[in-house]
Amino acid sequence: MALSVSYRTTEKGKPFLGVRYVNCQTYGRLYLNDEKKAYVGCCPRCGKRYQVLVGEKGTNSRMFIASC
């Protein structure tokens, strides 16, 4: 069963993760959703949606690589 995550991101100045989409050769951002439970967004070129859940321990990394 897939976890349902809200893609709503209305807050101004919200935290984000930088993402390099290797297949589409572009850069984009995943923004913290309004529930503050996941970073969400999509590839700016092909539109594939991504979500990264916020964990208890987290990571200090702010840049990630994704395949479309």
Image (tube, rainbow, N blue to C red):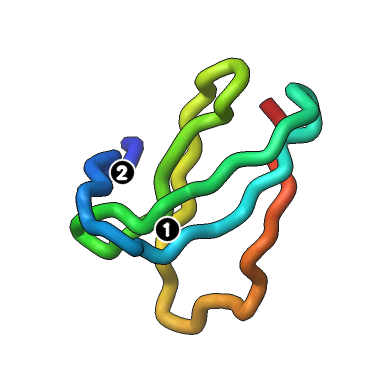
Residue at point 61%, 54% (across, down): 18
Residue at 36% x, 58% y is: 32
Q: Is residue 51 shown left or right of residue 67? A: left
Q: Does 23 appear above or below 50?
A: above
Mark 1 closeness class: few <14, some 14–19, many ≥20 residues within 10 Å: some
Q: Where on the picture, by quarter, is residue 63? A: bottom right
Label 2 residue SS: loop
CB atoms at circles 1 and 2 under 8 Å apart? Answer: yes
Residue at 51% from the left image edge and 77% from the top image edge: 58
Considering depth in this image, is 37 or 17 the residue closer to the camera? Answer: 17
Nearest-to-viewer mark from 1 and 2: 1
Q: Is residue 1 left or right of residue 57?
A: left
**Numbered tag placed on residue 27 in the rendering:** none
Along the horizontal axis of the image, is 11 left or right of 67? left
Say which residue label 1 marks. 53
Residue at numbered disc 2: 3
Label 1 residue SS: strand
Amino acid type for the residue under numbered disc 2: Leu
Residue 67 position, x and y percent, is 72, 32
25 to the left or right of 1: right
Front in this rendered view, residue 3 or 24? 24
Q: Quadrant of the C terminus?
A: top right
The disc, 1 or 2, on the residue closer to the chain's N-terminal end is 2
Q: In whole angstroms, how far apart are the C-alphas of marks 1 and 2?
A: 10 Å
Type of residue at label 1? Leu
How many numbered marks are there? 2
User: In front: 14, or 23?
Assistant: 14
